[in-house]
Amino acid sequence: MVKRKLVVICQSGGKFTTSSDGSLSYNGGEAHAITVSSESKFDELKLEMADMWNYDPNALTMKYFLPNNKKTLITISSNKDIQHMIDFHENSATVDIYVMKDDNPTTDVSPAPMPRNRSRKTTVSESVTPHSNSIPDASISEETGQLSTMTPPPSNAESFLLVDNLNLEVSNVGDAEQQELLKIWKNGITGLHQQFNSVHEFREALSRYSIAHGFSYTYKKNEGRRVTVHCKGEGCPWRIHASRVATTQLFRIKKMIETHTCGAGTDAANRPQASRKLLASIVREKLLETPHSKPREIAEEIRRDFGIELRYCQAWRGVETARKELQGSCKDSYNQLPWLSQKIVETNPGSVVSLNSREDLSFHQFFVAFHASLVGFQNGCRPLIFLDTTTIRSKFQSELLTATALDGNDGFFPIALAVVDVVNDANWQWFLMQLKSALTTICQPITFVADRLMGLRQSIPLIFENSFHGYCVDHLIEELKQQFDKTYTQEVVPVVIAHMEDAAQAATLDGFRKSIQSIKSISPEACDWILRTEPEHWANALFEGSRYNHNVCGVAKSFYSWVSELPALPILHVVDTIRCNIMELMYNCRVESNQWLTRLTPSLEDQLQKEIFKAQSLQVLLGLSSSFEVHDSLGAMHVVNVDLWDCSCREWQLNGYPCSHAVAVLQHIGKDLYDYCSKYYTTDAYRLTYSETINPISTADKPVHKESTPVQIHPPPLLQQYGPPKRRRIRSIGVVKRPLRCSKCNGMGHNKSTCHVNS
């Protein structure tokens, strides 16, 4: 592995400035140079910088920008973060690091959107040829170190929060975070020629500016093309005029008198109050930072940051309005699926995408398998696929079908997904047909692990010839509970389940029969039911395929937990969230595996070491040819055939790596244990699994819904609402409704909207 050397230029004494589009730039200062490599340690780098500028190392915070993103700062707080920074910029010539000094290092201060003026700048230049990986604009969580994509806020966003009588008093803002926020608001308007993306953005900046500076204003002109504002203070000359730039939606300040004679900011009692629109914009910003926040969490943040008490219903309405604004309508999102299908194929060539609608143009099926996932499965994963399904949170009928594999470290690896309007045999058959067309280079038989009741018993052998269908034991146990929970006491069913799990895990036929006999002695009825579930599809001793000792669909749960943990999102955002999570997963696994020095993955190294430890007490007797007898301290004997990778305990065949008996034989005859492990467990195979990258998808050309936009895909039917029907008030016989009275003409039988009397 090539050691990557970097030239780091540290600057001190400069200042940050903010451009009209919100991006940051750093100017001025002195410079020093040091050398950094991919093996540099975080503590050493921090100490070197602290020594260079004679600062307390505990008071320094290092941050940097991702490529093509000058608005979001990423924190460096560990060795892994340094490696992340190097990898993110492997397509860039340089990277800037900003070292911010905290005058009170013992205080936990949350990072502000803008750096402080006492920041230092570090420029890093690469001296090796970078690899060609495409990483999207993203941020690294300071707590978890995880990569997450960043979505810029809409430029023309206006939402209404139904909040009654809520005031934001600047005089009540006292803590450090609020003072820092007001400082940003004060700099929201800088003077002549400042430019905004829209008139709405200008009005919002003006509202925050007036609150931060402590004065009220009045509109002299407030139109879509021009806005003129005066200070409300008597005789105060402060005023500002802005207008739209010709042929664009941009808004620019044309005139501004910045002087106040009204004592702005000195009279706390007369400070301006936050408008409903401003509060709505605050909710929107909170959702941008934490998209999955709940209304109660948003209300708590607003109370902490601004001192505003929100009732739950008020916060809920604000969150719903802001989410709709940020994410678009769920209904419109289905009509954007054709665009998404095309963009996936364009940005990730080799991916397989299929979109189908019903005859009435309502949504039916959407299948996605990214090229990186297909290549990773075919080059590095075991021919073992887990199928499962979960419901997507939506007001429309939406179900997620997933196909998941295992990597060499026993971590889950997403292969393909599909969103369908309903789970049935036809949709499962369609999903398997799409999966078959995507896995064009797979020649060996594939083993599927799935629920036996999902309509796959006929579809799997029909579409994937010579394949095997292993029933998920967890689903069988749930069936068993439903069947016998009311028949037996609470103490009996768990015992039967425990013996059933033993029967499934038993490697030999004798072990399986022993567990079944134990079940029969407890409940003959339960034993008969279990035997009717076709044990040849779920018991290790009887199963003909290769499941590598995995007989549950728990692997797929990690996949669809990405969706089940999401709030109700438009379908476009659901698919994109999964894409981003797969992208993050593949990147993290690729970076982590580059540090491995063993032939096998860490998980399998641990398993093999356990077998080596157990082999120490075994005795090997020489046999004929490649067969050997192995005796343990209890007198049990097992036969091991080295050439066939076979042991009479069947653990070697089931797991794909030598059992303790095989380890004892291989060590006895001087063979390398690693040569007798499945190739899927090697570090090389693991790296092949994550060798490809999912490329980002730009939303710059995403179609915007308009009334004239042609409809290609309608949403599926609404979810059926369960529960008691709403009660309707039935008026008593003889009770007459109050007659209508017009407020315009005072006439009876009509209202103002239908009045024909001239005003």
Image (spheres, grey):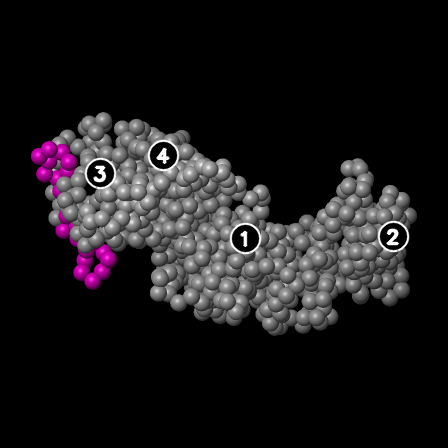
Q: Quick one: label 4 or label 3, which is nearer the N terminus?
A: 3
Q: Quick one: label 2 or label 3, which is nearer the N terminus?
A: 3
Tell me, yes or no, whether the two marked residues, 1 and 2, touch with CB atoms within 8 Å: no
| Type of amino acid under label 4 | Asp
In this rendering, position of residue 754 left or right of residue 582: left
Disc 3 from disc 1: Cα separation: 46 Å
- Return the residue nearer the eye: 623 or 69: 69
| Residue 713 percent coordinates (x, y) | 47, 65
Q: Secondary structure at mark 1?
A: loop
Q: Quick one: label 1 or label 2, which is nearer the N terminus?
A: 2
Look at mark 3 in the image and give the residue it sits on.
210
Tell me, yes or no, whether the two marked residues, 3 and 1, touch with CB atoms within 8 Å: no
Q: Which residues are magenta?
A: 231-254
Q: Secondary structure at mark 4?
A: helix
User: Of discs 2 and 3, which sits in the foreground?
Assistant: 3
Above/below status of 349 relative to 470: below
Q: Quadrant of residue 689?
A: bottom right
